Amino acid sequence: MTRLNGKTAVITGGATGIGLASAKRFIAEGAFVFIYGRRQAALDAAVAELGPNARAVKGSVSNEVDLDRLYAAVKAERGSLDIVFANAGAGSPLPLGQITAEHIDEAFDTNVKGTIFTVQKALPLMGPGGSIILTGSSAGTTGAPGFTAYSASKAAVRNLARSWAEDLKGTGIRVNVLSPGATATELAKQALGEAGQKAYGAMTPLQRMADPAEIAAVAAFLASPDSSFMTASEVAVDGGLAQL
Amino acid sequence: MKKLAGKIAVITGGSSGIGLATAKRFVAEGAHVVMTGRREKELNEAAALIRDNVTTVVGDVARLDDLDRLYTVVKEKHGHIDILFANAGAGTIAPLAAATEAHFDQTFDVNVKGLFFTVQKALPLFRDGGSIILTSSVSNVMGLPGFSAYAASKAAVRNFARAWTLELKDRKIRVNSMSPRTDRDPRFGDDDGPHS
């Protein structure tokens, strides 16, 4: 499949999990991919796995100087940018009653402010046919114990796409939200353990967690012209978890 | 791309619009398509455009006898179904104050009852692990003057996907609803395709 032939993509949170699976898929479909993440060792391992059509830039989405370096690297090597997958996310559970300002900032700095500047700073390199994909979450439309900050931040991400579809009118750039449910990334498997993975699987109509490659397949669809009439949409890839 | 190589797909409302475009794409991706529509001439013309790997059965999804005939053909020719695109839809514009019983019945007979039995009658032929796609509409969550029956029928379709997801999960049959905005369809208000 060569739906992304000649395209240049940036994937934040690209060294592991859904980001890495998407980098693999985008490259398999013909793209050149810049992955962006905070941990050098993880980036190095990812690039070694991804091969010659991948580059890594180390940085945080909540640091504007880092983001400027990312896009300078894209501009220097490729000149322009077709696809932004704003996928970096953060958050930890904390019940109402124990929430601190730091806890709120952890989720909102990365998920909301980080997403905004990841996209804003990419725009000068983008043009007609461009596709922006934001990682939402099934948590953006559901409640769960301790999920105050994370859920609210993902609801905000979903709504960014609505305003941006208006702001981007006439540019030929589309923006959509991809909302995964429980996904069996290495990080999630470690955090949840066997029992936690079973519990999430049991809550999901498809009776299991997602393989990151299943999220990546939909990211590739949203990145490609196959989704050319979609903008401001949310696509749930959650095994039905938040859809019933 | 041959993502659908060897798959047997049934498409209702296949004569024109989204149904026809989807039939073309499914065949291009390797599927064999059985499509149905009410108008024989249009259905045959549509099949002629696709040429290979397409079978037509004339029929109306609002008539249960027609659905039985459709699935009899599918069973005899292929023995099973992997993909069902329940896409046939109808709707005319009528403000609440002026709408007739016929307007209401036509909309719900095709979009709700017809789709319900399109899926129910497919189940005995469905392979476990298959995919069912329902055509809803963006109007399933929107209010539009003159569209109350149509929009309500499409909200019903969207909600079928919720219950059926749970009812069919043990067979690993996935159910999703797709909500197009089809204002590029020139035949607005006619039948055999979704309109919003």
Image (spheres, rainbow, N blue to C red):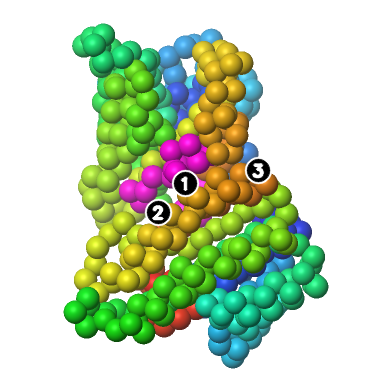
Q: CA distance from mark 1 to mark 2?
A: 8 Å
Give residue A165's position: percent from left, percent from top.
28, 49
Q: Nearer the viewer, mark 3 or mark 2?
A: 3
Q: Is residue A163 above or below residue B158?
A: above
Counting residues from the start of the chain, the first of labels 1 and 2 encountered is: 1
Which residue is painted at 44% across and 61% down in the image? Answer: B157
Return the mark for residue A230: 2
- Tell me whether the residue at label 1 lies in contact with that at label 2, contact meaning CB atoms closer than 8 angstroms: yes
A130 displayed left or right of A192: left
Q: Do the residues at pointers 1 and 2 share their chain?
A: yes
Give residue B52's position: percent from left, percent from top.
73, 74
Return the mark for residue B170: 3
A122 displayed left or right of B38: left
Q: Is residue A184 above or below residue A194?
A: below
Q: CA distance from mark 3 to mark 1?
A: 29 Å
Seen from the viewer's position, the closer of residues B108 and A129 is B108
In this picture, which residue range is highlighted in magenta?
A221-244
What type is the residue that disc 3 sits on?
Asp
Q: CA distance from mark 3 to mark 2?
A: 32 Å
Which residue is painted at 62% across and 39% down in the image? Answer: A28
Give residue A53's position: percent from left, percent from top.
58, 32
Q: Secondary structure at mark 2?
A: loop
Q: Is residue A59 visible?
A: yes
Which of the image's four quarters has the C terminus of chain B?
bottom left
What type is the residue that disc 2 sits on?
Met
A55 displayed left or right of B59: left
Query: To which residue does mark 1 refer?
Result: A222
